[in-house]
Image (cartoon, rainbow, N blue to C red):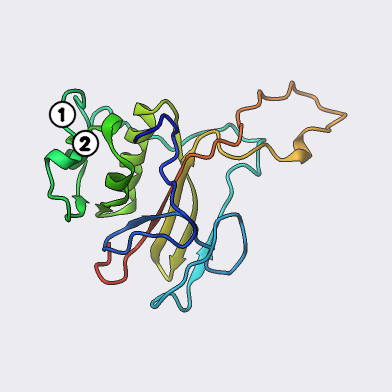
Amino acid sequence: MASPSPSMERRGAGDEDTTGGVCVTEETKMCNGADDGVGSVEGKGFAGIESDEYDLQEDETEHDHHAEADVNNVVNNLDGIGGMSDNYADDDLYAVDSGKSIGLIDFLNLSEEEVLRFNFADVDIAFVFYQQYAKHHGFGARRSRSAKCGEVRIQQEFVCHRQGYRSPKFYPMPNRQKRPRAETRCGCPARMLLRMDDESGR
């Protein structure tokens, strides 16, 4: 990316990559129309969508685990490998079908346009990609909200592990028996939103 900010998206409202695959987009609303700070899913093929949303910051009584895979086994050496523009033509989508494809990416030199061109085979591979991106830019990653249409997940959001804030109900506890946990959330804006493309099914 051009700047040191960990945010994966800097496009205006309504801009999105519609060239195919699971696309990275800026603002969408969840399927039920609720405004959760994320915008709206629109277009053909989205009728009858059920929303499968959850917010991991609501319950701070549980230990703050992050769904992190062992991505070091997937990527052995990213240093010294050229950027994605060295491996693909300008008009191609960057198809990522396995962990081996992720090993060819130079995450430190990815441009914003290159990130928006990635097309992932499934959500798990996209999460490994975002974990590697986060690792190279100095933050951790976790899964956040998702939306399903039947059994098929059509949207998934990945965020920084410090995204959001602790729920206010956990601050004023006068009869607290245990020492309160350290504050771990700071409202980090880093996020990546994936949407399934109707035509390609990716």
Q: Is residue 69 left or right of residue 94?
A: right
Give percent across and percent down for residue 48: 48, 78
Tell me if residue 18 comes above or below residue 95 in the rendering: below
The residue identified by callout 2 is 105
> Is 87 displayed left or right of 9 in the figure?
left
- The residue that disc 1 covers is 81
| Residue under the image location 56 percent in, 38 percent down | 163
Q: Where 14 falls versus 6 (above or below)?
A: below
Query: Which image quarter holds the N terminus?
Result: top left
View extreme (top): residue: 179
Q: Residue at image x 32%, y 31%?
A: 70
Q: Report x, y in % for residue 84.
A: 19, 40
Density class for disc 2 (Cα within 10 Å; few <14, some 14-19, many ≥20) is: many
Label 2 sits on a secondary structure element that is loop
When the figure is inspected, residue 19 is found, relative to residue 24, above or below; the finding is: below
Precedes in sequence: disc 2 or disc 1: 1
Residue 198 in view (yes/no): yes
For this orientation, the residue located farthest to the right is 174
Q: Secondary structure at mark 1?
A: loop
Q: Residues within 10 Å of mark 1 (few under 14, many from 20)?
A: some
Return the mark for residue 132. Answer: none
What is the C-alpha distance between the residues marked 2 and 1? Answer: 7 Å
Task: Please tell me how many numbered marks the rendered image carries.
Answer: 2
**Marks 1 and 2: in contact by CB < 8 Å?**
yes
x 42%, y 75%: residue: 43
Q: Position of residue 69 (x, y in %)?
A: 35, 35
**Amino acid type, residue under disc 1 in the picture:** Ile
Left or right: residue 79 versus residue 185 is: left
Quadrant position of the C terminus in the picture? bottom left
